[in-house]
């Protein structure tokens, strides 16, 4: 594989979508071929799984283990059908969330045994690893407010979790970033859209 794989992580409302679109545009302006995708989702099957996972009417119907397996199933499909082929063609792949989300949301948020999360990750992802992970770090309360204002007050199944859940998620991300400083670039999500854009661009252009 000779493409380049970038993932964006952070808790809800941290600004991933905004920054992914801007980065892809800037890369394309330089003549690069970019695949933007997301998790859960990004494929026909993955988008169906996404709808199931986010549907607020399933609030009490999905066990923690089922949730973990559904996120993993969506990922398996995305890697095989889109990410690996794009990387093999030498493209830049930008993915809105990847396995770090599973470690913090299911491993820490849902308190599923980390050994199980890791084993499943090995099965699903194999040796594939992001070349760069942009972590947009944001206070959990502010992130939820942003998500609420964006969706006219409607929160999906996971967004309905408690503030403590999202604080665990945020801290989990910061721990992951500390463990792998060569892969993670952590950026303060409170900065302006343009300031974040510039930091991301400066980070990414240095990679090629
Ligand atoms: N999940 C999981 O549990 N396990 C897994 O393995 C995976 C995922 C892969 C997917 O949601 C859900 O699945 C997520 C984790 C879980 N659940 N939650 N909760 P998603 O990724 O589709 O959605 P999200 O994480 O909730 O992100 P989002 O709400 O789409 O937000 P975003 O993309 O990070 O931010 P945005 O849409 O760019 O910005 C949000 C708003 O803030 C918008 O009005 C912007 O204009 C504004 N914004 C953006 N940047 C700024 C700055 N810098 N300042 C001020 N305002 C800003």
Image: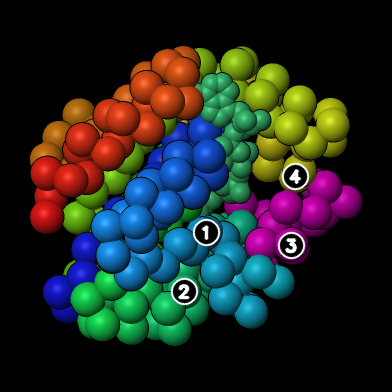
Instruction: From the image, tell me which residue sits under label 2.
Output: 78
Q: Which residue is mark 3?
A: 51
Q: Is residue 139 left or right of residue 125?
A: right
Q: Is residue 101 visible?
A: no
Marks 3 and 4, how far apart in space?
10 Å
Q: Is residue 93 magenta?
A: no
Which numbered disc covers residue 11?
Answer: none
- Which label's residue is closer to the chain start, 3 or 1? 1
In the rendered image, the quadrant that contains the N terminus is: bottom left
Q: CA distance from mark 3 to mark 2?
A: 15 Å
Instruction: Say which of marks 4 and 2 sits in front.
Output: 2
Does 62 lie within the magenta span?
yes
- In this rendering, the label closer to the viewer, 1 or 4: 1
Residue at the image point whose x is 12% and y is 44% from the top: 206
In contact (CB < 8 Å): disc 2 and disc 1: yes
The magenta region covers 49-64
| Residue occupied by mark 4 | 157
| Left or right: 138, with 6 as reference point | right
Residue 2 lies, with reference to residue 103, above or below; the image says below
* Image-quarter location of ligand 1: top right
Dot 2: element: helix
Q: Residue at x 27, y 39 (%)?
A: 201
> Horizontal and vertical percent for residue 100?
37, 47
Percent from the top left, x then y, of residue 170? 44, 26
| Residue at image coords 74%, 32% | 150
**Quadrant in which the C terminus appears:** bottom left
Q: Which residue is mark 1?
A: 39
**Going from the N terminus, do you reach mark 4 or mark 2 first?**
2
């Amino acid at each position: 594989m000779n493409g380049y794989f970038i993932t964006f992580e952070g808790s809800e409302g941290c600004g991933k979508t905004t920054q992914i679109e801007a980065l892809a545009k800037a890369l394309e302006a330089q003549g690069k071929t970019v695949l933007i995708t997301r998790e859960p989702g990004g494929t026909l099957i993955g988008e169906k799984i996404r709808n199931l996972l986010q549907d607020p009417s399933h609030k009490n119907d999905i066990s923690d283990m089922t949730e973990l397996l559904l996120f993993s199933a969506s990922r398996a499909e995305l890697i095989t059908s889109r990410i690996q082929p794009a990387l093999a063609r030498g493209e830049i792949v930008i993915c809105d969330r990847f396995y770090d989300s599973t470690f913090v949301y299911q491993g820490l948020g849902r308190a599923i045994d980390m050994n199980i999360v890791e084993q499943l990750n090995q099965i699903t992802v194999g040796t594939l690893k992001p070349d760069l992970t942009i972590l947009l770090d944001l206070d959990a309360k502010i992130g939820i407010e942003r998500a609420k204002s964006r969706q006219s007050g409607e929160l999906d199944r996971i967004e309905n979790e408690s503030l403590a859940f999202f604080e665990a998620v945020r801290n989990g991300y910061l721990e992951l970033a500390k463990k792998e400083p060569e892969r993670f670039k952590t950026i303060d999500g409170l900065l302006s859209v343009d300031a974040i854009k510039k930091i991301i661009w400066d980070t990414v252009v240095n990679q090629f």
